[in-house]
Image (tube, rainbow, N blue to C red):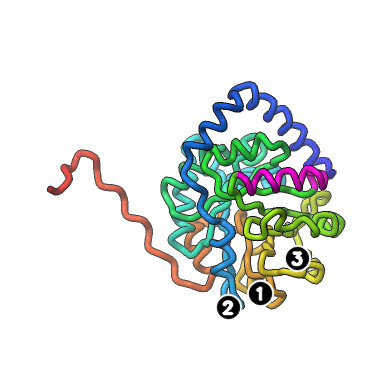
Amino acid sequence: MPETLAVIVAHKREEIARAKEAIAFGELEALVAQQEPPRNFFAAVTRHANTQHTAIIAEVKRKSPSAGWIRPSYDTSDFVPEDFADQYARNGAAAISCLTDERFFGGHLSYIQRIKDRVSLPVLRKDFLIDPFQLWESRAAGADAVLLIAECLTEAEIVDMQILAQQLQLTVLLEVHSLDNLLRVRPHVGFPHASYGLLGINNRDLSSMQVDLNHTLRLTELVEDRSILVSESGIKTAGDLLRLRKQGVRIALVGEHLMRQDNPGAALAQLLGRGAAPPTPPAPSSDIEPKE
């Protein structure tokens, strides 16, 4: 495991231990039972993907270990994740990815429900999930899908997490960074139910932290069903999406590029080759009486 990832996972184990002490499992089960059924993340990203169109999973992301704060304005306590999700939803996103890791990415688990209260798109919890407890936690927080990073998990752990995720009706985006891990997890993609599983290829080298879009293009030859393949990281232009589609990759997760822009929603529209949606009008003042 690369050093940066090892540091994050070690911290995550401590975080999970504290979370388990803070809530009894029975309480967590009750919170899950109170949640509305998950939105179908798998269908949202696969049904809109074709030879002419890339389905974009647009990400709400404040910072990263490699980039720091993506914009200085994100380093404030009044960051509003749902505003970005709303921009994405109005400008062609198929689904939303939300960073929930606090220490390294500036996220928070509460962001998921805040986003879902604003937009109708399904939401992926993007975090370092290494314990079944976190899947229950994700569903209780309103997540419709979860990220599992192969580099953080053994094969047995991946299979167990996939089974539980399917029981909780969560779509799994199983992510790999390397050829070795792709070969290791390839037999498990879509287990135990095909309509709950996506395969992600992350273009970031975890050792050097460098990003290369060609990484996806090289590894696609080893993926039989490209309809469930998601390219992640380093995607910035419509030309990048075209290159991916020519190789049969029709779903992409884009975050840092969009979050760096003055208007992430307009940047998404440009990426998709469409006109930007007008800004959301401000809410009416609370001191104005509603019409009868």
Q: Would you say the residues marked 2 and 1 are in contact, meaning their CB atoms lie under 8 Å apart? A: yes
Question: Which residue matches tag 2?
Answer: 52
Front-lying residue, 128 or 174? 174
Precedes in sequence: disc 1 or disc 3? 3
Q: Do the residues bearing badges 3 and 2 touch, measured as CB atoms within 8 Å?
A: no
Residue 285 locus on image (x, y percent): 24, 43
The residue depicted at 57 percent of the width and 73 percent of the height is: 53
User: If you read the primary sequence from the N terminus, does the residue marked by circle 3 or circle 2 appear first?
Assistant: 2
Residue named by callout 3: 216
The residue tagged 1 is 245
Is residue 41 shown in magenta?
A: no
Residue 105 pos. (x, y %): 64, 41
Q: In this orientation, which residue lies closer to the viewer: 260 or 191? A: 191
Instruction: Tell me the element at label 3.
Output: helix
Q: At label 2, which amino acid type do we have? A: Gln
Identify the main secondary structure in magenta: helix
Q: Which residues are magenta?
A: 151-167
Give the amino acid type for the residue marked by disc 3 in the picture.
Thr
Question: Residue placed at 48% from the left, 51% from the top?
Answer: 84
Q: How far separated are the C-alphas under marks 1 and 3?
A: 11 Å
Residue 130 at x, y percent in the picture = 73, 39
Rounded to the nearest angstrom, the CA distance separating label 3 from label 2 is: 19 Å
Choose the circle earlier in sequence order: 2 or 1: 2
The crowding category of the residue bearing disc 3, from other C-alpha atoms within 10 Å (few below 14, some 14 to 19, many at least 20), is many
Please identify the quadrant where the N terminus is shown: top right
Judge from the rendering whether residue 290 lies leftward or rightward of residue 55; answer left or right. Answer: left
Image coordinates of residue 75 in percent, x first then y, are 55, 39
* Residue in view at x 84 percent, y 55 percent: 184
